[in-house]
Image (cartoon, rainbow, N blue to C red):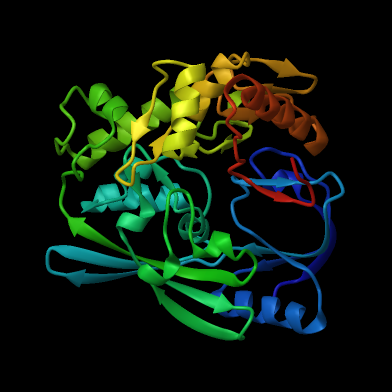
Amino acid sequence: MADRLTEVRLGPYTTLRVGGPARAFIEARTQDELVAVVSEADREGEPVLILGGGSNLVVSDEGFDGLVVHVSSRGVDVADHGGRVVITVQAGEDWDDLVARCVAEGWSGLECLSGVPGLVGSTPIQNVGAYGQDVSQTITGVRVYDRMTGEINDLTAAECGFAYRNSAFKDDPGRHVVLAVTYALERSDLSGPVAYKELADRLGVEAGARMPLADVREAVLGLRRGKGMVLDPADPDTRSAGSFFTNPVLSAAQAAELELRAPGHPRWDMPDGSVKVPAAWLIEHAGFPKGYERGAVRISTKHTLALTNPSGQASAQDLLALAREVREGVVEKFGVTLVNEPVLVGIAI
């Protein structure tokens, strides 16, 4: 079993570089260690925080008064099913390393998710998505430790309750610890149909075209770098938690009210009659441009959805003050309440 450490500062384990100390900290290097550590803490009544890549996390300046379990399990099992390959990946594997391998091997289905920071175990929780792909399109199962029953279960995709940037795991936080994720991918050197206009334009093709996996990966990485969304120590705009707010999904009535306030605003009509609106557009048109600063924090100079800690010296409270200012400004201007995408630990907007 890994050593139990004390007073480990959590900021360096997050991409935002904010967050105080953990009272206790353990590195779980295998699936069995992860289950053993969490189950023991639960029996002792000790609060537990599961920490992956820290790319979607904002920890309070006071830190976490309990046990932080850092997921470091490794391993990729590959099964050939004719035209498909089924891979079962341990939760502690780096996500972009996995995508790079899939592209190199000719396994199609994850290429548009290139450059997304974090670990595999977080992907089903957020239903991670970008540029027209999300993981719910390829996940066939998730192995979890159920902290309520003390059992290890293999959940089907349907049981995961996937929705836009959401899942059953996010709806019931803390119950399940993701141990491994299984993805079914097409054995092909071509991508799935390119569904996202910005990506299609970058590739110089019509929407729906299929392109070489490597070309799609490079195009996605280029787009993400242009928005400060690929981790780079030399780029202070990447010291963020990615998109801080999700794109609001409005009812028909809410969309009609927004149309009165902002005629002709950008929108995506959804199959169920709801309307998705780009949060970045709302933020910018509410008076918060790229590079907008508040003390030690600022909106990214590349993309209004990212709140950044450019100097690395900001506090969680500094960040939340800017998040509140942006949220309240959008409500005042457009009547739409933005919802934070990162998980907040010990704090609330």
**Residue at 42% of width from left, 19% of height from top?**
265
In this orientation, does residue 142 appear?
yes
Where residue 99 sits in the image (x, y, percent)? 36, 49
Where residue 100 sits in the image (x, y, percent)? 35, 47
Task: Count the labels in the image.
Answer: 0
Q: Quadrant of residue 322?
A: top right
Where residue 92 sits in the image (x, y, percent)? 53, 62
Above or below for 94 versus 253:
below
Indicate the quadrant containing the N terminus: top left, top right, bottom left or bottom right: bottom right
Apparent side of residue 14 relative to residue 88 in the rendered image (left or right): right
Apparent side of residue 195 relative to residue 308 in the rendered image (left or right): left
Q: Quadrant of residue 148?
A: bottom right
In this orientation, does residue 141 appear?
no
Camera-side residue of 270 and 320: 270
Indicate the quadrant containing the C terminus: top left, top right, bottom left or bottom right: top right
Above or below for 30 versus 63:
below
**Residue at 42% of width from left, 50% of height from top?**
97
**Residue at 69% of width from left, 21% of height from top?**
298
Camera-side residue of 158 and 5: 158
Where residue 232 sits in the image (x, y, percent)? 55, 31
Above or below for 59 versus 276:
below
Above or below for 165 versus 289:
below
